[in-house]
Image: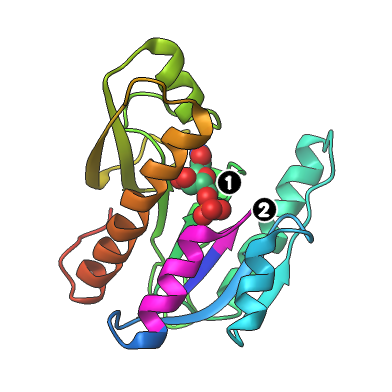
Amino acid sequence: MRIVVLVSGSGSNLQAVIDAAQSGDLPVEIAAVGSDKPEAYGLERARSAGIETFIAPLQKGATPEQRQEWNRRLGEAVLSFEPDVLVSSGFMRIVSAEFLDTLVRTDGQAVPMINTHPALLPSFPGAHAVRDALAHGVKVTGCTVHQVDSGVDTGPILAQTAVEVLPGDDEPTLHERIKTAERDLLNRVLAETARGEHTFS
Ligand code: GAR
């Protein structure tokens, strides 16, 4: 199964996928890693592993037209690698419904996009899931891998893992424990997808 992975930051989840793929534990080929941020450390991780990278920057305060153009450029870059699946792993951008509609390979195969999120959706969608869960005082949170649809973290849920909030947790400590669970969850869902165990809408 060929995948393209999108990252915006550190890419520690991406590293777990790279490691599993390289060790032969995960039947996945990472065709490319892309980012909206040239400085994303995830790109460095990809280069060190000999994986192709691409950058699709989105300028601050982009107009709707510029956003549309960015979606078009991102889609073109992704499709040039003919992936089976597109993975958003710490990619902190919302893609448009048109972007998802045009994710179709030259052989006509639709390319599903999946995302990993650091909360038990539908609770705490958005960019600050760990902070929001702590602020709400939940005792259990976790991570979700879901198919991306045109909403913000609203697509069909593929798998989840619960993570307990411990006394004294702050955002970094809790997020780190969630990420440990998230890495296993993402690799599990990718393995299941490679085996054809998930159907995508
Ligand atoms: C992960 O926890 C991921 O779920 C989250 O960013 C982190 C990226 O970590 N994504 C979101 O919050 C998207 N809404 P990483 O760059 O170290 O893999």
* Mark 2 residue crowding within 10 angstroms, few (<14) / some (14–19) / many (20+): many
Res 140 → quadrant: top left
Res 7 → quadrant: bottom right
Residue placed farthest to the left in the image? 197
* Mark 1, residue position: 95
* Mark 1 residue crowding within 10 angstroms, few (<14) / some (14–19) / many (20+): many
What label sits on residue 71 in the rendered view? 2
Magenta: main secondary structure equals: helix
Instruction: Name the residue: 64% across, 82% down.
Output: 48
Quick one: 75 or 11, which is closer to the camera? 11
On the question of residue 150 being in view, the answer is no
Instruction: Name the residue: 31% across, 65% down.
Output: 187
Q: Are marks 2 and 1 in contact (CB under 8 Å)?
A: yes
Q: Horizontally, is 49 left or right of 86 in the view? A: right
Quick one: 139 or 38, which is closer to the camera? 139
The part of the chain drawn in magenta is 6-21
Query: What colour scheme was applied to this rendering of the protein?
Result: rainbow
Residue 44 picture location, percent across and down = 69, 71
- Whether 21 is drawn above or below 7: the answer is below
Residue 133 picture location, percent across and down = 40, 21
Q: Amino acid at mark 1?
A: Val
Residue 177 picture location, percent across and down = 38, 43
Q: Amino acid at mark 2?
A: Asn
Q: Looking at the image, how many numbered discs can be counted on the residues?
A: 2
- Whether 188 is drawn above or below 125: the answer is below
Q: Horizontally, is 99 left or right of 57 in the view? A: left
Instruction: Name the residue: 57% across, 61% down.
Output: 6
